[in-house]
């Protein structure tokens, strides 16, 4: 039985300082026409953009994939900053670190769920693909 596609588009932000993780995310969502991916390499930049979106009633992300180890930043701190900036949106923040314990620290800081960050032989993250497909 075929799986039904989601009825509304999903805007996903990836906050990660690793190019290879961005490539994996791009490859993962490439077969999901309902997903739009926006890439950030800096948590501070993402928080600034999010704050402007909240102030101007723009299109906030539905999902933020949050890495823990960012260049000079930590995902738990960025998560707290995003939550403190939320005014009208309620974004699902995903602990998305290759270190499982770090993903759980992100959840303790206000994220909603953990999705395993890994890449298969085809260059996609099957855990992320499944999670996005099941999100309706």
Image: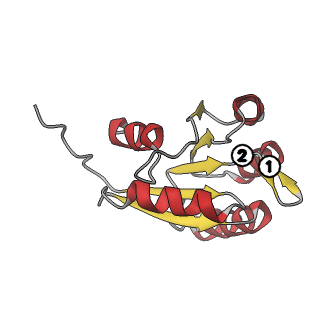
Please give left or right for residue 130 compared with residue 99 in the image. left
- Mark closer to the chain start, 1 or 2: 1
Which is closer to the viewer, label 1 or label 2?
1
Image location of residue 4, percent across then percent down: 18, 40
CA gap, disc 1 and disc 2: 19 Å
Quadrant position of residue 43: bottom right
The quarter of the image holding the C terminus is: top left
Can you name the residue that lies furthest to the right here? 72
Badge 1: residue crowd in 10 Å (few <14, some 14–19, many ≥20): some
Q: Look at 34% across and 35% down and name the residue there.
A: 134
Query: Can you identify the residue that label 2 sits on?
Result: 83
Above or below, 57 relative to 29: below
Q: Look at 53% across and 66% down and name the residue there.
A: 38
Query: Observer-nearest residue: 121 or 98?
Result: 121
Q: Look at 60% across and 56% down and name the residue there.
A: 21
Q: Secondary structure at mark 1?
A: strand
- Dot label at residue 80: none
Q: Secondary structure at mark 2?
A: helix
Q: Look at 61% across and 43% down and name the residue there.
A: 93
Image location of residue 51, percent across then percent down: 70, 64
| Image colouring | secondary structure
Image location of residue 74, percent across then percent down: 83, 49
Image location of residue 131, percent across then percent down: 42, 37
Please give left or right for residue 117 compared with residue 106 in the image. left
Query: Observer-nearest residue: 85 or 68?
Result: 68
Can you name the residue that lies furthest to the front here? 121
Q: How many marks?
A: 2
The quarter of the image holding the N terminus is: top left
- Dot label at residue 69: 1
Quadrant position of residue 96: top right
Can you name the residue that lies furthest to the left here? 1
């Amino acid at each position: 039985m075929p799986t039904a596609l989601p009825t509304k588009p999903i805007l996903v932000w990836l906050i990660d300082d690793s190019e290879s993780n961005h490539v994996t995310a791009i490859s993962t969502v490439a077969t999901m026409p309902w997903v739009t991916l926006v890439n950030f390499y800096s948590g501070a930049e993402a928080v600034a953009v999010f704050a402007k979106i909240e102030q101007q009633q723009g299109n906030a992300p539905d999902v933020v994939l949050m890495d823990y180890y960012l260049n000079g930043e930590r995902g738990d701190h960025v998560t707290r900053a995003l939550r403190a900036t939320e005014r009208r949106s309620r974004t699902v923040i995903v602990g998305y670190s290759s270190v499982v314990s770090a993903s759980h620290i992100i959840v303790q800081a206000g994220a909603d769920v953990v999705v395993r960050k890994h890449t298969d032989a085809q260059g996609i993250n099957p855990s992320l693909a499944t999670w996005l497909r099941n999100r309706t």
